[in-house]
Image (spheres, coloured by chain):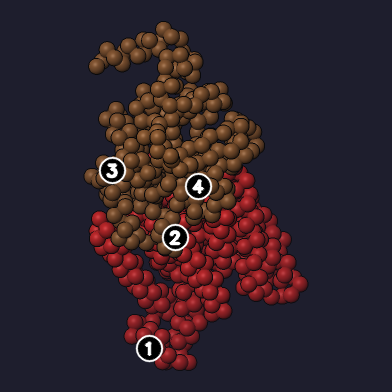
Amino acid sequence: MENIQKKELIKLNDLSVGYSGKVLIGDIELSIAEGEIVTLIGPNGAGKSTILKTIARQLPPIKGAVYIDGRELSKLSYRELSETVSILLTERIDPELMTVRDVVESGRYPYTGHMGMLQKHDDEVVEEALALCRIEVLENRYFRELSDGQKQRVMLARTIAQEPKLMVLDEPTSYMDIRYKLELLSLLKKLRDLRKMTIILSLHEFELAKVISDRIICVKDRDIIKVGSPGEILNRKVLCELYDISEENLRILLHSMESVV
Amino acid sequence: MKKRRAIRYGVVFFLLSAAFFILMILNINTGNVGIPVPRIVEILSGGDEGSSAYSIVRMIRLPRLLMAAILGGAISVSGFLLQTFFRNPIAGPFVLGISSGAKFAVALNMIFLLRVYRSVSSWNMIAAAFLGALITTGFILLVSRRIKDSAGLLVSGIMVGYICSAATDFLLTFAEDSDIVNLRGWSLGSFSGMSWDNVSVAASIVTLITVLSFLLSKPIDALQLGENYAKSMGVNVRFFRILLILLSSILSATVTAFAGPISFVGIAVPFLTKSMLKVSKAMVVIPATFLCGAVFCMGCDLIARCAFAPAELNISTVTSIFGAPIVIVMLIRRKM
């Protein structure tokens, strides 16, 4: 796969990200190819979400720029942005009286007409997204009634229904049990392989990151400390450094995982 | 599901329209002078001109009834827009103090202008009410930046409401006698004494703003998922929120300018409507809320006129009796 020359989709050019004028992580240079899955790992509060939000234009860059398909992100119209990037946030939503299907249908927002009426094609896309996330049976349930894990899958289906070029997923595995975590991974791979979708996500589970990612970015103490393929990054030394854990504790953790199997 | 929903919409709209027509007849029919239904039909179609029944229906009951319907719908839609804005079902023009702010501005404007010109136009009253509503809303917005929880927001709104009401009372105490007669009833809320001129002004503003709100159904729905998701769907959230607050303020200002503050309708009616429809899609909820608000206020006005005739109750007294318990039910259901 590496030998195929891939088109660049995202370019972070001398990018500084942060909140209200204060730089959290500065001078990021990164290029992401179309169809690549890039995972951000690192401890809580390191700045993963801030990077993701800036790439999705939820936050303005403090310095530098994000380029998508050769165009500066901040120059896209609202409509173009929504057709290009979809996002899954960690914030929880609480929509009143919206069914699962209503929530997923909201992903079609950029493609529907002025009053938001769905066409036949939109229905098909929505149904496909429901099926991909295995929530067809929940379709008519009210979103508020669901468990956190189910809600997370609904929000993921919404992100897929938006049919973007780039999916930005902030901790998509949170609240999910192990089965759905694994299903999520194969789903993301499917989206990449079949739809050439580019996916940038953050994960807490480095073992999952290893299986799914084309590239891993380690974020620690408001800095990107390492970028590389899973093979290069995910060794004991880097993990110990990244999460500030002793070799001994990591050994216990890895051992406990193995001992189950 | 789509079919089930469509049937539900149909039933709700049918019931509301039926209630609308029944209340319309009842409102014309009952009062100090009872007018039987055949006479009403005759008068409405232009017959019986010159009789006292004719002038009662044409000059008093019909404009009052239409005003109750138009303003009741307006205050309900205004509440719905505010709830969308604050993403909080207990937001409404009355509890947030917006109605009282508008009331104070109108009272100030009236007393001042009456002294100078001896007359005040509807447009002038609306402009003053709008200004008052905007200032109060601006204040509530400032508070809502500091106070994130809805209980705090609500308490500060109620306090603002009390301050504005107190200031209005203060003004009324010092106003000249002739002004007071006009202002007393109005400052407590009433649909009485509406002219056809009032009706046409209110109808044109309310229709325009309600239609505009209806056309914003799509971004209103998007905002249900929170600002950040709305942004990612392509909504210009900052601009859109300003638009929402303007539309909502114009509606509550129009209501206050003509009928004074009307309590709890703005919260109770959208809640009732959504509970009946079991959906929150603005495209359905906005027209249904308008209709339901019209029915609610026509019903309340009927009670205000007739319950203790010849004495008349303030409209807010009646809307509170019915509206406040609904709000309490809503709060209990929400906690569960």
Vertical position of residue A236 compared to residue A158: above or below? above
Write the residue at 44% across / 76% down: B32
Q: Which residue is mark 3?
A: A132
Task: Measuring from the top left, give residue A222's x and y in whole percent.
Answer: 57, 26
Q: Which mark is residue A69?
A: 4
Same chain assignment for discs 4 and 3: yes
Alpha carbon separation for disc pair 3 and 1? 64 Å
The kind of residue tagged 4 is: Asp
Q: Nearer the viewer, mark 2 or mark 1?
A: 2
The residue closer to the viewer here, A50 or B248, is: A50
| Number of other residues with Cα within 10 Å of mark 3, as a class: few under 14, some 14 to 19, many 20 or more | many
Q: Chain of mark 3?
A: A
The residue closer to the viewer here, B157 or B317, is: B157
Q: Residue furthest top?
A: A248
Alpha carbon separation for disc pair 2 and 1? 40 Å
Task: Measuring from the top left, give residue A171's x and y in whole percent.
Answer: 42, 32
Same chain assignment for discs 2 and 1: yes
Q: Which residue is mark 2?
A: B217
Write the residue at 62% across / 67% down: B126
Write the residue at 40% across / 12% down: A250
Quadrant, the N terminus of chain A: top left
| Labels 2 and 1: the sequence-earlier one | 1
> Which chain has been coloured brown in this picture?
A
Q: Nearer the viewer, mark 3 or mark 1?
A: 3
What colour is chain B?
red
